[in-house]
Image: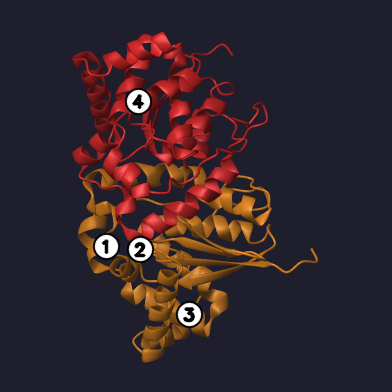
Chain colours: A orange, B red
């Protein structure tokens, strides 16, 4: 294709199962559509504070709905998500600050590893299986040291502010930079609309050119 | 097809633009998939009260987002939605009680007209920025849908009867029992399980659950022009 790839920015947090769904679909399509996928590690807690929103799980009926919604989407999108039993009591409370600073450091130092390490973290929180991301021990130790440096803290803050400037009230958001307009799309369920805006083909959440097994 | 059609219940309120989007997509697919579409006029205000939720538009960033989201979906799904000038007044002040009671009465007396009358009410409030709360407004929608003025006036009289009020209340309670915290909800009754799907953006997932083909929001067997 002769034309310039359109940039898609995916702002995500590993605390968010819908972020994982959006991530996997976009990772499949980045090799099919004429796009350049930029992964943006973001702090969902910061988005909530800045927008005045609250996690959907705080409303009882939404919490119930999320469990079955995520289960069905997990099957349909072929992403191995299992809602941890203690999600609300443990994971939501603990938050994702360290994980997202870690990913921010990965992006700054080893951007080619960002996709794999993000997936590894989602697997740890949201899946029964823990898998290796292929990062050496030394690299991991170095990165953990950097997590609390001002540079990494500031970068995560800036990325989160950028998402807020795009109008985010939650995550994931996909920002599509078309030739003449920019669109912010919220959630994991605007991918077919994204294809339409890009003038690309939608072949469902598991397109044929991809091996869905993670 | 030899097998029994699966029932899809669509709980909707004409105040909700996403309800209109879900409605149109399901109306297109009801003639393609092996399903039976049951339209359920529901009161979104009742859902909000019962679930402790609030309309998304109450959060400033969601209100901003809704405008562009609805505009893009309107194009993609080919449904002529245009935001009313005074959105907050229409949605939060004026509401839809009379309109949804009227549709309840239509469903009880002339169910074959329910789809058309629902569409005409959406066209008024969500396409042409016209009122749907006053009797002449409701009569105009009914007539545009093909009802005679006599039929429409008869149904309008029924709107304040206990039967119609109770029926709308029961339908709203049924949606709450399915777990609704907003509208639209689509309840899919499969052979061995029932699924409640929220929003207008679970239709491809619905196709997957039904074992049917998804051909996008404007499938070929249909003339998209409304």
User: Mark 4 — residue?
Assistant: B41
Q: Looking at the image, is mark 3 or mark 1 earlier in the sequence? A: 1
Compared with residue B30, is residue A90 higher up or lower down, i.e. above or below? below
Characterize the local packing of mark 4: few (<14), some (14-19) or many (20 or more) Cα atoms within 10 angstroms: many
Residue underneath mark 3: A106
Whole-percent x, y for residue A186 in the image: 45, 57
Q: Nearer the viewer, residue A173 or B16?
A: B16
> Mark 1: which secondary structure?
helix
Is the Cβ of the residue at disc 2 closer than 8 Å to that at disc 3?
no
Nearest the viewer among B26 and A58 is B26
Asked if badges 2 and 3 are on one and the same chain, I answer yes
For the residues bearing labels 3 and 1, Cβ distance under 8 angstroms: no
- What is the C-alpha distance between the residues marked 3 and 1? 22 Å
Q: Is residue A61 left or right of residue B71?
A: left
2 and 1 marks on the same chain: yes
Quickly name the residue at label 2.
A15
Q: Is residue B93 left or right of residue B77?
A: left
Report the Cα–Cα distance between label 2 and label 1. 8 Å
Q: Secondary structure at mark 4?
A: strand
Q: Secondary structure at mark 2?
A: loop
Residue at (64%, 45%) from the top-left corner? A203
Please tell me how crowded label 2 is: few (under 14), some (14-19), or many (20+) other residues with Cα within 10 Å: many
Q: Can residue A85 be seen here?
A: no
Residue B73 x %, y %? 53, 46
Residues at circles 2 and 1 in contact by the CB criterion of under 8 Å: yes
Say which element carries label 3. Answer: helix
Q: Position of residue B56 (x, y in %)?
A: 33, 50
- Identified at 63% across, 32% down, the residue is B219
Q: Nearer the viewer, mark 4 or mark 3?
A: 4
The residue at which mark 1 appears reads as A91
Above or below B165: residue A197? below
């Amino acid at each position: 294709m002769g034309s310039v790839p359109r940039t898609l920015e995916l702002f995500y947090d590993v605390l968010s199962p819908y972020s994982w769904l959006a991530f996997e679909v976009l990772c499949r399509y980045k090799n099919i559509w004429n796009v350049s996928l930029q992964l943006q590690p973001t702090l969902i807690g910061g988005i909530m504070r800045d927008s005045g929103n609250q996690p959907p799980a705080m409303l009882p009926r939404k919490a119930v709905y999320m469990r079955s919604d995520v289960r069905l989407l997990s099957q349909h999108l072929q992403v191995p998500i299992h809602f941890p039993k203690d999600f609300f009591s443990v994971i939501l409370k603990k938050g994702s600050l360290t994980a997202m600073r870690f990913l921010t450091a990965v992006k700054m130092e080893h951007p080619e590893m960002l996709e794999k390490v993000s997936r590894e973290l989602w697997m740890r929180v949201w899946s029964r299986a823990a898998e290796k991301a292929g990062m050496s021990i030394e690299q991991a130790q170095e990165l953990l040291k950097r997590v609390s440096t001002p540079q990494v803290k500031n970068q995560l803050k800036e990325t989160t502010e950028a998402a807020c400037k795009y109008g985010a009230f939650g995550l994931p958001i996909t920002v599509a930079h078309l030739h003449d307009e920019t669109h912010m799309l919220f959630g994991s369920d605007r991918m077919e609309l994204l294809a339409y805006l890009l003038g690309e083909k939608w072949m469902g959440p598991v397109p044929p050119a991809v091996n869905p097994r993670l």
